[in-house]
Amino acid sequence: VPRIVDHEQRRARFAEAAAEVIATSGVEGLTMRDVARRAGSSTGMLTHYFADRDELLLATFLHAAAAAGHRIERSLQRGLDPLDALVEGALPLDAQRRRAWQVWLAFWGSSIGRSDLAAEQRRIQRAFHRRVQAAVEAARTSGRFHPDTDVEATTAAITSLIDGLALQVTFDPRAWPAARQRGVLNAALAALGGGGRRVD
Amino acid sequence: VPRIVDHEQRRARFAEAAAEVIATSGVEGLTMRDVARRAGSSTGMLTHYFADRDELLLATFLHAAAAAGHRIERSLQRGLDPLDALVEGALPLDAQRRRAWQVWLAFWGSSIGRSDLAAEQRRIQRAFHRRVQAAVEAARTSGRFHPDTDVEATTAAITSLIDGLALQVTFDPRAWPAARQRGVLNAALAALGGGGRRVD
């Protein structure tokens, strides 16, 4: 149904324009007018899709989260190990993924003191947690992780590692080329999943 | 010199009032008027200390960072292992430390697209990194961590773990009582520092 495709494409284009505005002018510089202009559209058209700035900010956040989900899915379909697919899909390894982290950090900051936005973040956070947990369980099954791995604690640690590393990279990208990010993450994954094996 | 003490105390009081405003109304609700009112003062007095909202936001961020530094220092002076002092001082284990994380997340969000604020975050981030590195080196010396521990990679991983776990806790505090935070962090620390020991 072409009209639905058009609608979704236009929403995505506005969300990407909003991400660019956030990255260059900050979240406080996010105005309906600037986003419309950056998308080559009009404020009237933009408000047809998003009633206000809050709705646009939320959509921009969810769009970046969905894009990360698609990156991870594509890596899984290419046969990548689920843990590696997470690392490749989630870490800020290139400009596109750094932009996603800028959007997420901007959204998180805006969610402090805003229970409606915080609830959306909690929902996305739990979905990411489930994805990490599935990867940890797969690693235990495949033998990459020791069978005695504590799935719950390891899932929380890996989720924390990815988010915390991305935070460091976002504010210091020149210190963090992709190879250094992968090196730190993979060494930590090996320690978290392999420690148990060496005990017995 | 009492006047300097007064000055510092009043700055601290304004920074704490600003943290409360951020936690309840969000960073976009941070106005000079509301912060002055919450501190039981006047906008005129507040602008005597902070020229504008940006200056106040930065001071609020730095105040929370300094308070975390003092918590860690006090724990070290009480004889806590440096890694444990970091965990106790930095994780959002109680209401006061959860408030600090709300301030940091709000500030990080505001720093996206703002090179002046991002530079301050980078400076604080590097200082925290040095503190973690000193704790990793101490753990290697004391035998808590294996002598072959890769200090640089382990420092980056522990910094990431603390920041990433705090992020999860901030948006889902009921799911993260202090005991669960400590459990996840301590298990991860044991894996990161102990894996090497079991190889030989």
Image (cartoon, coloured by chain):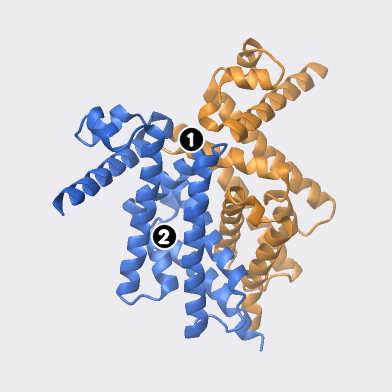
Chain colours: A orange, B blue
Is A197 or B5 nearer to us in this picture? B5
Q: Amino acid at mark 2?
A: Ala
Sort mark 2 into few (<14), some (14-19) or many (20+) by Cα contacts within 10 Å.
Answer: many
Determine the residue located farthest toward the top in the rendered image: A44
Determine the residue located farthest toward the bottom in the rendered image: B200
**Chain hosting mark 2:** B
Q: CA distance from mark 2 to mark 1?
A: 22 Å
Q: Amino acid at mark 1?
A: Ser
Q: Quadrant of the N terminus of chain A?
A: top right
On screen, residue B80 above or below A77: below
Q: Is residue A149 visible?
A: no
Q: Is residue A13 visible?
A: yes
Horizontal and vertical percent position of residue B86: 42, 66
Is B50 or B69 nearer to us in this picture? B50
Q: Label 1: state its secondary structure.
A: helix
Is B53 or B105 nearer to us in this picture? B53
**Chain hosting mark 1:** A
- Which residue is painted at 63% across and 81% down in the image? B196
Q: Which residue bears the numbered disc 2?
A: B90
Sort mark 1 into few (<14), some (14-19) or many (20+) by Cα contacts within 10 Å.
Answer: many
Q: Quadrant of the C terminus of chain A?
A: bottom right
Q: Which residue bears the numbered disc 1?
A: A110
Horizontal and vertical percent position of residue A36: 65, 18
- Which residue is painted at 54% across and 37% down in the image? B114
